[in-house]
Amino acid sequence: MSAQKDGWISSLAFLLFCASSIPKCGSASLQQELSPQHYFSGLEAGKTSLAFFTPSVSPGAQPFLEQIESSAEVLQDYGISVVKVNCPKEDVSRYCGKENALRKAFLFRGNRLIREFPTDALFDVNSIVANVLFALLFNEVKYIETLADLENIENVLKGKSNMVFAYVPATGTAEHRAVMEAAFVYGTIHQFVLTTEAALLKATSHDDPDVSSAWLLFYHCQQVTEPAQPCRRTALAQPLTLLSIHRHLKLMGAPLVTEVAEDPEKISTVHLQLGLPLVFILSQKETYEADRRTAEFVAWQLLGKAGVALLSRDLVDLNVLHRSNVALKTPEEGMPIQYLVLEDTDEVITLVEDKNKVKQIQEDEQEEEEDEDEKENNNQDIQDDQVVEAVSRDKKRELPLEQILVLTEENFHSSLSEAARTVVLFYASWEAVSLAVLCSYSEVAAHLKGALGVLLSRVNCWDWPGLCSQENVTQFPTIKIYKEGQQSVTYDGMWGTEELSSFILLSQVPCPLKLTTVDEAEGYLRGEIPSELSSHHHTSLLGVFSTDTSKAREAFEEAGNILSGHVRMGMYFEDDALALSRKYSVSPPALLLARSGGRSVEGIALSQHSVQDMVQMIRYQLLDIFPEITVSNLPRYLQLRKPFLILFSAGNISQMERKEMLKLAKGRPQQAFVACWLNLKKTPVGHGILRTYFSTTPSLPVLLWVNLHAGGQVFKFPSEQSITEMNILSWLEKLQAGLEIPSSTLSEEDWKPPLPAYDFLQMMEPSVPELSPKSGNTPDPPRIPGGDTARGGGDTASREEPSQESTAEEFGSPGRDLRGTAPRLAARDKQGKRHSEL
């Protein structure tokens, strides 16, 4: 219905324009000349007529008669008839008297006189049409003289209707006629306001407008909700004609932002129909709200110059670069849509105003792509960072991120209340480790799919630096678990899928878990309690306390808070705690350590009652007695800063070797070295380690003593001897006595990568806020212009005047960054395109 109405208005206005502005093949004559009696007797209710009375002989009347006859056809288009009334010589009535004859014209509606005009005010067609319509549209067009009058009308219209404010230097001009003809068509839709006061025009502007020219401003009052909020204004930038007014009002009546869900090539809006370009802001569902505000901000800036549409990538399969964030469609037929990568909204505006900008941007992007490809090809063979290399290799692989909620500044806090626990990955889309962790995180999401009470989400800190600073995220990546009413827990373990899943699952269980009966305690040691972890194999740690060991119990509880997510801890402090602990040959306070599903329970007396000592002791006790060294657990054992007695094997070690090594490890509790083994098939990096120790890889299995923290000496167990506890102890005694010669000695120099690290901070734009624990604010958003511009250029002063416009924040503007759009900013891609989001 709205489209039909717009089409009717458009057609009518165009016909009116043609009727009044284009010469005709023939000219309509005035109605038949009537006598006063015939004229007044023939007046019909609701019919409008313009009459002038003249005696039979009218010297000097020819110029006026020509103009009034020329205007007759135009006025007929508005339902106004023009009548010449011949006055008899003897008629001295009001209309035929000497003071009125050919000195005044009279406008009647029915038999009611609306207005009388001096004929010297009707000097040409423009003045006749303008003044007649002005009188006829008395209620539709309000004439004002002061700023107070304008403000009163504006206040009345807020939330109800829009206003068209026009200034003409004088009435009866072509511009005055254009305003009146537009008011005749649009007067029932918008409130028209007219003035000829130059002082009023200057009062509404913030510069020194040219008062010799006509001006027209559209006041967007209908959408204003607060009485104190001013109406936005958009000026007509073209010379004031009926066609330009019609075009301007059509643009003002179009949707500010058009949401589209189909191929942009098939989209046609009123802007394209009127010869203006259409700008597409490319969006995705996760950042819809931010994208919508960005599109609205751009639309206000380009109002009257271009249309703006919000195009969802999720609904349209676009065969364009993922990092493209803006598209431009021009009204010229056959011109392809241009997909571009822009940094901020200023570039979008420049894009519309400068037609050469599109070509320049495309040429720059092509050069950058070629440079990046060349650099990537040159560096591929010498890339020492395996994480960066892996991300670069897999950069075209699509990650299954459907199960991971995208968080922004808008939905962050509300999303935290949607689940019992919310896991948040804070990352940077340009950083290699972040993207590698995002890959593991997607696997965790698939593994935990359907888990009750757990919501996995992510925040791109490059898009939302203020949010990440607010959450005290100072490094990438960071994972935090939020639970309502509790302080968030930060993950500080390895980034593998198994480790992340274990951390999330363990964080669901209170740490320590308080048990109330011996049966619960026994079930806990067997791995049956809590039930949600019964299918997962974790070493269970149970603290047993009597009533008189409250200090140790408090330290144990605090240690549990520190180790939450990393350790499966329970606590039992009922009256029969002594009987439970004695079953395992210890007395309270004590730890019961259950490995392998409770088949082996070890009792450990608690002698240290400080929190830090207890945390350190628990971490040590949870280490395996004879661990298999992997990439993920190596840091835990390196932190002990002890020599390694490590057995390298081409596969699983034999039962005899395992038995002898376990006897050695168990025989000396709290010993001064770490007994361990490494499976080269599962951890192939071990081949490189052996090549570092020896010029050639020795025959396997091979037992080595490596002291990384003191001298870096590597000793090899004699290959001719069998690996038994006695032989190893005898060999270690010789080492202590200095009777063995090291096979190699590691260099004391730091192991550094051959290539310098990326200086990301230097590459960052100065305008992008740095992430720091103390800085949580983003740069102030720009002020949105109220539209107080005319005839092309912008009005700088008007964009800063608070009395006529509000800040971008008040209108919900996202600022100048296109950060909310689906792809990343161009500047960010420049900093490392090989780190683009997978």
Image (spheres, rainbow, N blue to C red):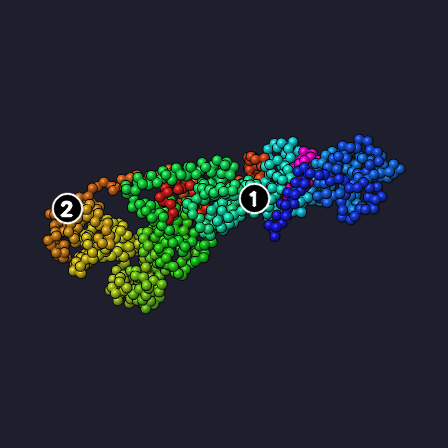
Q: Is residue 359 left or right of residue 272?
A: left
Q: Is tag 1's residue or tag 2's residue first in the polypeptide sequence?
A: 1
Q: Nearer the viewer, residue 80 or 716?
A: 80
- Label 1 SS: helix
Disc 2 is placed on an element classified as: loop
Which stretch appears magenta?
162-181
Quadrant of the rendered image containing residue 556? bottom left
Residue 648 in the image: above or below residue 128:
below
**Observer-nearest residue: 120 or 651?**
120
Identity, as a three-letter code, of the amino acid under mark 1 = Gln
* Residue 221: % across, % down: 61, 45
Q: Is residue 544 left or right of residue 23?
A: left
Q: Looking at the rendering, which quadrant does residue 712 occupy?
A: top left
| Residue of label 1 | 273
> Where does residue 362 sit, x and y in percent of width and height?
43, 38
> Residue visible at 67% across and 47% down?
188
Q: Amino acid at mark 2?
A: Ser
- Distance from the alpha carbon under mark 1 to that under mark 2: 83 Å
Task: Point out the residue furthest to the right here.
Answer: 90
Q: Which mark is residue 743?
A: 2
Residue at the image position 61 percent from the left and 43 percent from the top: 249
Q: Is residue 528 left or right of residue 151?
A: left
**Residue 491 can be seen in this image:** no
